[in-house]
Amino acid sequence: MKRIIAVANQKGGVGKTTTNVNLATCLAQAGKKVLVADMDPQGNTTSGLGVDKYKVKNSIYSLLLEEAYLEQVMLPVCVEGLHLLPANIELSGAELELADMPRREYKLREVFNHAKYLYDYILIDCPPSLNLLTLNALCAADTVLVPIQCEYYALEGLTQLRHTIDLVQRKLNPKLDIEGIVFTMYDSRTNLSAQVVDEVKTHLGKHVYQTIIPRNVRLSEAPSHGLPITLYAPTSKGAEAYELLAQEVIAKNTIA
């Protein structure tokens, strides 16, 4: 089943971009055709996949403003079957540019009208805030994948995001659902990590992925080299975890 997945959490620093980059790569390495849409003006997903965001000629900003075609923007990256719609700081101006446009929340959905038939998965990296770019991602998506850091404020951020998803379901995109919740930066040496996992499972057990992403030095190093973890440190615990997560996502969508 083809799927458009928004990777989102309104709280920053939870491993959202790391999850987007590495899950997309692992899905492609598993033989799936994958498109990554970088909707964060910081462009970290773009650089994390080895693209110099400062030298990008056409970006997702150009698509949203209907100044370029999909084929002019998407770039092949790092592994076969994986393409990127890159972003850079000019995307921060999209809020003002889109403000007066009709159906402004659906510009990204319109971009995907053709692309969704070309790929098995489209993953969208959302900004860590609720703005027009995030709304575009949630209106274009079928589901939302939520990375949660195993720390004290995780549940607060999850509550905010669930409220946002419910609001978008009611007002803009009735089909939107939760793809799953994945725990990141898990430290087995602390009681807090285990407590956060148990608390979330108590409330949202059916949505929680079994795979847990550990706190891993190699995962932290990989973005500075412009490489996903399976290319930078393929035998690391981080690489193994994202490979398992990709298989879990594939299995879930095969059943669906």
Image (spheres, helix red, strand yellow):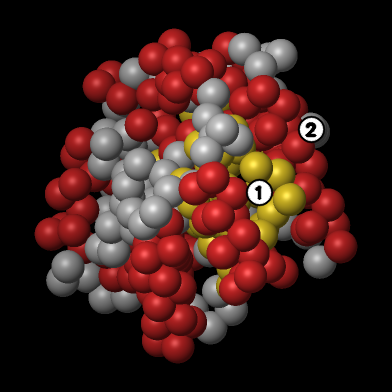
Q: Secondary structure at mark 2?
A: loop
Q: Is residue 248 left or right of residue 117?
A: right
Residue type, mark 1 in image: Tyr
**Which quadrant of the figure has residue 53?**
top left
Residue at horizontal 29%, vertical 70%?
Answer: 104
Residue at horizontal 71%, vertical 69%?
Answer: 206
Q: Spot the residue most to the bottom.
A: 170
Front one among 208 and 46: 208
Q: Position of residue 131 (x, y in %)?
A: 25, 63
CB of mark 1 within 8 Å of CB of mark 2? no
The answer to which of marks 1 and 2 sits earlier in the sequence is 2
Residue at horizontal 19%, vertical 39%?
Answer: 90
Residue type, mark 2 in image: Ala
Q: Is residue 225 left or right of residue 234?
A: left
Q: Position of residue 219 (x, y in %)?
A: 52, 23
Q: Is residue 166 left or right of residue 246?
A: left
Front one among 256 and 164: 164
Residues under labels 1 and 2: Cα distance? 12 Å
Q: Which residue is mark 1?
A: 121
Q: Is residue 67 above or below residue 102?
A: above
Residue 30's label in the rendered image is: 2
For disc 1, the neighbor class at 10 Å (few under 14, some 14 to 19, many from 20) is many
Q: Let me know if residue 131 appears in the view.
A: yes
Q: Spot the residue most to the right.
A: 255
Could you tell me which quadrant the C terminus lies in?
A: bottom right
Q: Is residue 204 above or below residue 40?
A: below
Q: Position of residue 71 (x, y in %)?
A: 49, 38
Front one among 32 and 237: 237
